Amino acid sequence: MKKLKFIIIPVLMVFVAFLSCEKDDICSDDTSTTARLFIQFYNSANTENKKNATKFRVQGVGNEEVLSDYNIVTTNSVYLPLKTTENSTQYVMHTGYILNDDGTIEGNADTITISYNTKLEYVSKACGYKTVFENVTISVFDDGDKWIDYIRATTDNEPISNEDEAHFNLFH
């Protein structure tokens, strides 16, 4: 009986260990986590047509970090990460960006401020929580030489919880 006890106890411990594991103990790449703000660019003269921004560059305000995917590129959309611990994020969006040999910069820079409220939403044990952004608004600082004519929401103030569809359209 004592030998049986030494066999049964380890077998039961292994069995219990396997029961405590869940299939979601690994956060899949397909799982939706905190979404970035998705903005598409359109022609302000013909609002149905997308329009590229050339020599486009995006830089954070406050941390001065240049977004690596948007460092002097041609694009008609941008994905912007938002700060999850604050209620606003600012970026400088530059078009026609050229850094001259003497250190001067050519082109046109506009500063946008994205304001929002945050809410945590449980995803799973493995993935934890994601931040959902609600009541999102975007304003463009008017420096007298804006390349961005206006920005309009694509939905009726729906929360930003995924990146599947554009959240805002930027007209230039």
Image (cartoon, helix red, strand yellow):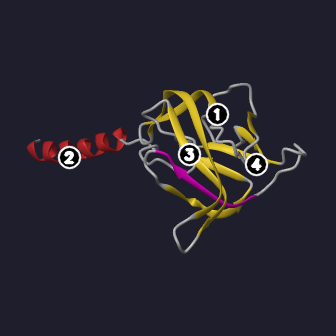
Label 4, residues with CA under 10 Å away: few <14, some 14-19, many ≥20: many
Give, as a single range, the part of the protein colored magenta.
53-61
Q: Which of pointers 2 and 3 lies earlier in the amino acid sequence?
A: 2
Q: Which residue is mark 1?
A: 139
Q: Quadrant of the N terminus?
A: top left
Q: Are marks 4 and 1 in contact (CB under 8 Å)?
A: no
- Residue 76, placed above or below residue 73: above
Q: Tell us which disc is closer to us: 2 or 3.
A: 3
The location of residue 49, given as percent across then percent down, is 87, 49
The location of residue 11, given as percent across then percent down, is 25, 46
Q: Residue at x 27, y 46 (%)?
A: 14
- Amino acid type, residue under disc 1 in the picture: Ser
Q: Secondary structure at mark 2?
A: helix
The location of residue 77, given as percent across then percent down, is 71, 51
Q: Which residue is mark 3?
A: 91
What secondary structure prevails in the magenta region?
strand
Q: Which mark is residue 41?
A: 4
Label 1, residues with CA under 10 Å away: few <14, some 14-19, many ≥20: some
The answer, for residue 31, to whether it is visible in the render is no
Q: Secondary structure at mark 1?
A: strand
What distance separates the C-alpha of mark 2 from that of mark 3? 58 Å
Q: Which residue is mark 2?
A: 10
Q: Which of pointers 2 and 4 lies earlier in the amino acid sequence?
A: 2
The location of residue 171, given as percent across then percent down, is 78, 43
Pick out the residue farthest to the bottom: 101
What distance separates the C-alpha of mark 1 from that of mark 2? 63 Å
